[in-house]
Amino acid sequence: MFAALALGSWHWPEAEQPNRDKGGDQLYLDATPRMKQQMGEALRRLTAAAGDFNPQVRTAALLALAKRGGIHAANAVKGAAASASGAVPEVAWASLIAQAFLGERTGAPYLSALLQGDRRLKRAAALAVSVGALQQGSGETEWGREPGRILATLESADLRATEGPEIMFARGVLVWKHQKTERYKAIFDIAVNPRTEREVAVAATQVLLFCEQEWFKRELVRWVRGEGDFKLRKQVLAGFLLLAASRGSAEGIEAVARYLTQPGRRPKGTREWDVRFYAAVGLARAFSEGRLVASSARAKALDALRGGLLSMHKQAPFRAALAQWLETNSVPIESDPHFRPLEQGVRRLEAAFVSRHALLSRDLTDACVHRVNRFTMRMLQVDNVQAVPAGSPEQSSTPLLILKADLEAFPYFSWREFLWERGARPAFTLGEGDPRSIDR
């Protein structure tokens, strides 16, 4: 399993680095014969591992092929998918995700799983739909151009009854990509409804972060003011504060300032997390992106950020980062109406706390990367692995703990896997297949 995942994260041998300033095909043409041979050997090993008798190895190999990209990886996954239907759940999930990353064109596997699969398979299929819809490049799929049937399936009463966050997110991705603007209202209602499951509400909020409808902008401010029909979940409120602040409208700044300048206002934050962190990041983004031009708006936003220092936990790392940002930027902001703080400084603010729900995502692809990486932990069965106490009769899970720690520190998938051309190389010979399984 470790070997398969490593082969998916292929690196050129250090002694034979080609010119990385050139494009994908040129990288291959510049490669030495030895490098080409190694590339072919790695892909051949992964292809063999996709049919391994060990389900964990099969799952890892499918994910590695998805990460590599290219026509050979796509053919390997297509061949493995034929035997994945009766496999253990994790293999079936990985097969769907891999097909999405490798450009499955018809959408048939997703529809079949959404209509006939169990609850977990439906969620995997929905995540695959999101991945496929957000692929970037020239090779748009047939179902991606005409997503009506898949969107209708995702919105069906049967799937709504088993609503999961991946299903909600996939609905939102298709609504956003194909501008089905009349469907945003249903997503909004799900986000603000207190009876909605928390993770589903978060998924709806992730989508609404990129909604540009005028009615939503008005509703957003109203709910941030506390004038909505329900009390918002704190994760939903965090997303709404971020959005209201970053858009830079006078009404939004005023609503956000109430949270930043009133220490007693609930929800109260902790050292690690606070909805006020999102409000502050939103205002910093508005400054950096040039959305705050009027002197009154800039002054109000600065006062709100200074007030935030008083309302946040005194030992919060984010509070220290915000104080540093204000020390660097307050004077030029006040003296020059056209001054725009560097985006790098805003990124440092964002890095000062952990946004577990990807609400700081700059686009839906960022949010989808986050979801895929969380689902990868589940597919590799490491999401719930815990250390075994010393002297316990239970079997040690040290290897899986190591893998879990590595995947948390270095998530397996990134935005690069959403590029169609990432695996583009001229065809090369793989050689004869090796019947041996890879070393586990």
Image (tube, grey):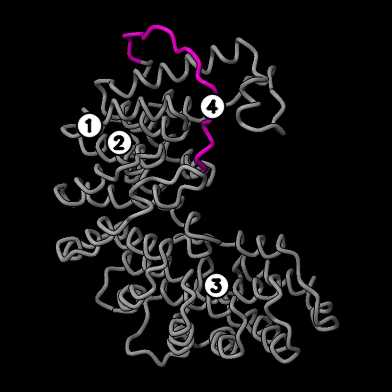
Magenta-colored span: 419-437
**How far across and how far down the image is residue 314, in percent?**
61, 74
- Separation of marks 3 and 2 at Cα, in angstroms: 36 Å
Question: Which amino acid is tagged 1?
Answer: Ala
- Which element is circle 1 on? loop
Real-space Cα separation, disc 2 to disc 4, in angstroms:
20 Å
The alpha-carbon separation of the residues under discs 4 and 3 comes to: 36 Å
Callout 3 amino acid: Tyr
Toward the viewer: 224 or 269?
224
Q: Is residue 390 above or below residue 231?
A: above
Quick check: marks 1 and 2 in contact, CB under 8 Å? yes
* Tag 3 near tag 2, CB within 8 Å: no
Residue at the image point whose x is 46% and y is 35% from the top: 67
Q: Which label is found at residue 278?
A: 3
Residue topped by disc 4: 10
Dot 1 or dot 3, earlier in sequence:
1
| First of labels 4, 3 by sequence position | 4
- Of the pair 54 and 211, the residue shown nearer to us: 211
The amino acid beneath tag 4 is Trp
In screen coordinates, is 262 left or right of 156? right
Q: Position of residue 197 (x, y in %)?
A: 27, 68
Q: Earlier in the sequence, mark 4 or mark 1?
A: 4
- In this rendering, the label closer to the viewer, 3 or 2: 2
Give residue 95's mark.
Answer: 2
The answer to whether the residue labelled 1 contacts the one labelled 3, judged by CB atoms less than 8 Å apart, is no
Closer mark to the observer between disc 1 and disc 3 = 1
Of badges 4 and 3, nearer the viewer stands: 4
Q: Position of residue 25 (x, y in %)?
A: 61, 27
Q: For residue 84, which numbered disc appears in the image?
A: 1
Q: Earlier in the sequence, mark 3 or mark 2?
A: 2
Nearer the camera: disc 2 or disc 4: 2
